[in-house]
Image: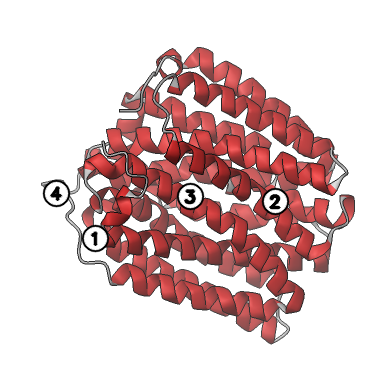
């Protein structure tokens, strides 16, 4: 494998893909911050913050077979680009609601549900496409840069969302819609990449191929389920508007900084991982960093000082990035191309359960027990998950290299 840290960018199609993925994630983060702040500012209802995640996760769960099959049977570039266009339309519709003073939770949540359908198709196609754009020798490098694109967007997107919303909600939503349009153009301008298609018709075994593969490969199952349960229990993103408004009292710009902090920590970590790839003790590092992710979450939950909260969230993002890096290499490099879309669709369910469903869990718990208890208890639970999974999946713990 080449030592060139920019090896993946030698391939023009990957450079276009990387740019489109960054822009899509940037726009999504911008919309997420603006919608979350506006809904909570107008309602002061923590439950609605949880529902924002739930309505976006549910389509991925209900459509998991269709989204994975679309990625494997149809062109992944076409599926990804079409999904971005639908996301652009949803951002435009939210812009219309804001401009016409019709920004009501029921309408916004309905649009976010449609947005969730688009994301359900987008995620497996996007994750699977990168393998078709670079040779195998450059794949680990491409994974590092691909994950960094999302994390860079997690830094700049929330800050932009907070700043733009501080000027005007419609400006935030309109900017996001324009960015989605640019991302779609980039994806559709990629030449049709090679893709291995499974021969034969669509049978039951074809439909459930992603589930079958993950269940059979216990290392893959352990890696993605570890991340799912840790983030499901310790996720605090949905409650950041409460911390920004009521606990830290830093306003919408401060909310953008809080949302950006995990991304900043993750980018610092992925920069180190690209420069110094994990060569030994990958399994042990995975479990240790998940436990540290839980510890940083607990510190954030107790903090009432803005600078300490930001540092803790940077730690959350940094340690989570190690888990993401290891999991993505295992998942993409070990999965046959003809079933990769369906495997990534199932993985999207795990990710959705940890992120969007985790936000719903946090919102529901915070409505009953308060934000501080919800976040701190979740961080402690994540540490317990790391210890339990180390016992349940010994082969994953004993994994040495990622080749």
Which callout, 4 or 2, points to the residue nearer the camera? Answer: 2
Give the spatial CA distance, label 4 vs label 2: 42 Å
Rendered view: 127 above or below 34: above
For residue 148, which numbered disc appears in the image? 3
Whether label 1 touches label 2, CB < 8 Å: no
**Which residue is under mark 4?**
201
**Which residue is under mark 2?**
238
Give the spatial CA distance, label 1 vs label 4: 17 Å
Q: Quadrant of the N terminus?
A: top left
Give the spatial CA distance, label 3 vs label 2: 22 Å
Give the spatial CA distance, label 1 vs label 2: 34 Å
Q: How many marks?
A: 4
Q: Position of residue 222 (x, y in %)?
A: 45, 25
Whether label 3 touches label 2, CB < 8 Å: no
Element carrying mark 1: loop
Q: Position of residue 256 (x, y in %)?
A: 71, 60
Rendered residue at 60%/49% (across/down): 263
**N-term mark: 3 or 4:** 3
**N-term mark: 1 or 2:** 1
């Amino acid at each position: 494998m080449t030592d060139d840290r920019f090896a993946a960018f030698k391939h023009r199609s990957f450079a276009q893909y990387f740019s489109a993925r960054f822009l899509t994630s940037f726009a999504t983060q911008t919309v997420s911050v603006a919608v979350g702040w506006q809904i909570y500012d107008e309602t002061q209802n923590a439950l609605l913050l949880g529902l924002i995640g739930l309505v976006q996760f549910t389509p991925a769960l209900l459509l998991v077979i269709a989204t994975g099959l679309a990625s494997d049977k149809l062109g992944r570039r076409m599926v990804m680009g079409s999904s971005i266009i639908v996301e652009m339309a949803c951002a435009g519709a939210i812009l219309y609601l804001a401009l016409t003073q019709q920004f009501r939770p029921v309408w916004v949540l309905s649009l976010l549900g449609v947005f969730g359908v688009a994301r359900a198709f987008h995620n497996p196609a996007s994750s699977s496409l990168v393998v078709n754009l670079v040779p195998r020798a450059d794949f680990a490098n491409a994974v590092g840069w691909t994950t960094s694109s999302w994390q860079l967007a997690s830094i700049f997107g929330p800050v932009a969302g907070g700043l733009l919303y501080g000027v005007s909600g419609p400006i935030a939503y309109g900017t996001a819609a324009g960015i989605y349009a640019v991302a779609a153009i980039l994806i559709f301008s990629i030449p049709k990449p090679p893709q291995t298609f499974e021969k034969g018709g669509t049978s039951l075994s074809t439909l459930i191929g992603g589930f079958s593969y993950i269940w059979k490969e216990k290392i893959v199952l352990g890696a993605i389920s570890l991340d799912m349960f840790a983030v499901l229990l310790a996720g605090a993103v949905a409650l950041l508007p409460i911390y920004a408004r009521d606990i830290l009292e830093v306003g919408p710009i401060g909310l953008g900084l809080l949302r950006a902090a995990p991304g900043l920590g993750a980018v610092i970590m992925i920069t180190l991982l690209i420069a110094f790839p994990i060569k030994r003790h990958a399994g042990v590092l995975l479990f240790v960093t998940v436990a540290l992710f839980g510890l940083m979450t607990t510190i954030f939950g107790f903090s009432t000082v803005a600078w300490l909260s930001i540092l803790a969230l940077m730690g959350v993002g940094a340690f989570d990035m190690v888990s993401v890096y290891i999991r993505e290499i295992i998942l993409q490099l070990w999965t046959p191309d003809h079933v990769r879309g369906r495997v990534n669709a199932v993985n999207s369910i795990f990710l959705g359960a940890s992120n969007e469903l985790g936000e719903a869990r946090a919102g529901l718990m915070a409505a009953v027990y308060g934000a501080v208890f919800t976040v701190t208890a979740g961080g402690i639970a994540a540490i317990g998950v790391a210890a339990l999974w180390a016992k349940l999946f010994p082969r994953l713990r004993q994994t040495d290299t990622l080749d």
